[in-house]
Amino acid sequence: MTTHAHAPTPATAAPARGYTATKDQLLTRIRRIEGQVRGIEKMVEDDRYCIDVLTQISAIQAALDKVGLGLLDGHARHCMHEGAEQGRSEEMATEMMAAVGRLMKRG
Amino acid sequence: MTTHAHAPTPATAAPARGYTATKDQLLTRIRRIEGQVRGIEKMVEDDRYCIDVLTQISAIQAALDKVGLGLLDGHARHCMHEGAEQGRSEEMATEMMAAVGRLMKRG
Amino acid sequence: MTTHAHAPTPATAAPARGYTATKDQLLTRIRRIEGQVRGIEKMVEDDRYCIDVLTQISAIQAALDKVGLGLLDGHARHCMHEGAEQGRSEEMATEMMAAVGRLMKRG
Amino acid sequence: MTTHAHAPTPATAAPARGYTATKDQLLTRIRRIEGQVRGIEKMVEDDRYCIDVLTQISAIQAALDKVGLGLLDGHARHCMHEGAEQGRSEEMATEMMAAVGRLMKRG
């Protein structure tokens, strides 16, 4: 996947994203989710009880929801604001609502 | 987490679970999800556009839903059947419905 | 929609469904949901604040999830049991898993 | 429920909401959902097959999701814009994200 066409960024500096201020915290959360996924891999390898694996899957879904909401929040506060200054409010609202719709339907 | 109390298994052999017949396929799917999670980690490290990260999160959630449904299906077909033979139908139906509820609410 | 082909029922008596024992309670819940939907209709007619309408929509969805889980539970305990006696366990498990998948994806 | 404190409106005129331009269309959709809820009430009264009722519940959830997304979209485009002019961007972003979170978790 290449950088989204709606979000051109200079080649020389890291672009400021909605999550820039909380990037470390976000990465910590994602790494924890990665560990949870490895956890269910191990559970299946060990022939653990189906219902216990399902409980862990629900926990991962909840953690992904939180990461998604956090990204959305940063996007609404920062990127949308910048977009408005560039006269792209409508386009960005459409794009954000499509993302919310995918999160609600889960893909 | 230790093996679920409702599912005692002999110490000498791998217990047969609802997913035993499709264990390799299940592990392949979970490893692919692990790769997808690492993918969003890399996207955040590279300051990629928020909406693109959100799209990937929705894709991971859809993949987890599929794994969850597959586990539930195997459980309903195999474990529930065994449970019925042991007179534990009621208890196992309650347990399964709780798992469905968690999947619907995502944790 | 006509009666589902998998569930033939005698013309002379009400068929026993998974929800037969709790039918009155189920009807009470559905009527309450109907009232909640009329409530958001009134809110929109009165030009009420969008976020307040959204809060009510989430409440209706939670109530529908509960009704759905209750139906599923009755189905798993009663109809699946009868189905098993008629040698239709596989077919009914497939059908139930499809229903769970629709509930998880919401349609 | 009273009108939300964050959305004071003059007593003399209908307040402009994010859905004002599409109010009739929105009301039509909500009335259709009301009819769908009455439909499942009738199905239960008629002892219809559990799985068929569940299919209708999923259809109602999908219709409610669409109404929710439409309200959210109007809110993001109109009310948020007005809010920004009143210096209430932060407060309104917080409020909207809470609504998105409730929609994702369904209440």
Image: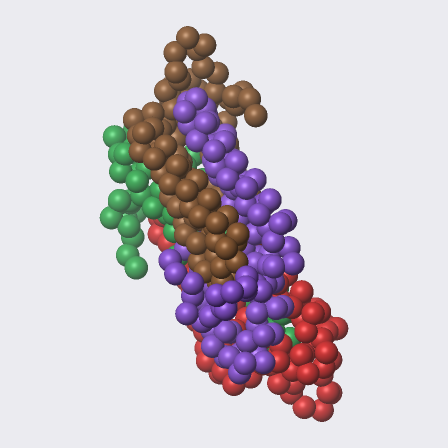
Chain colours: A green, B red, C purple, D brown
Give the vertical position of D52 relative to D63 (above or below).
below
Q: Is residue D8 left or right of residue A81?
A: right
Specify the farthest residue to the top. Answer: D12
Which part of the image, by quadrant, shows the N terminus of chain B? bottom right
Which residue occupies 30% across, 40% down?
A: A94
Q: Position of residue D9 (x, y in %)?
A: 45, 15
Q: Nearer the viewer, residue C7 or B4?
A: C7
Give the vertical position of A68 relative to C6 (above or below).
above
Give the vertical position of B17 relative to D7 (above or below).
below
Is residue A39 visible in the rendered image? The answer is no
Quadrant of the rendered image containing residue C71 = bottom right
Which residue occupies 58% across, 74% down?
A: C82
Which part of the image, by quadrant, shows the C terminus of chain B? bottom right
Q: Position of residue C41 (x, y in %)?
A: 43, 31
Total tally of numbered discs in the picture: 0
Which residue occupies 51% across, 45% down?
A: C61
Give the vertical position of A16 relative to B39 (above or below).
above
Is residue B87 visible in the rendered image? The answer is yes
Q: Position of residue C7 (x, y in %)?
A: 47, 69
Q: Position of residue C67 (x, y in %)?
A: 56, 52
Specify the farthest residue to the bottom. Answer: B12
Which residue occupies 59% across, 50% down?
A: C26
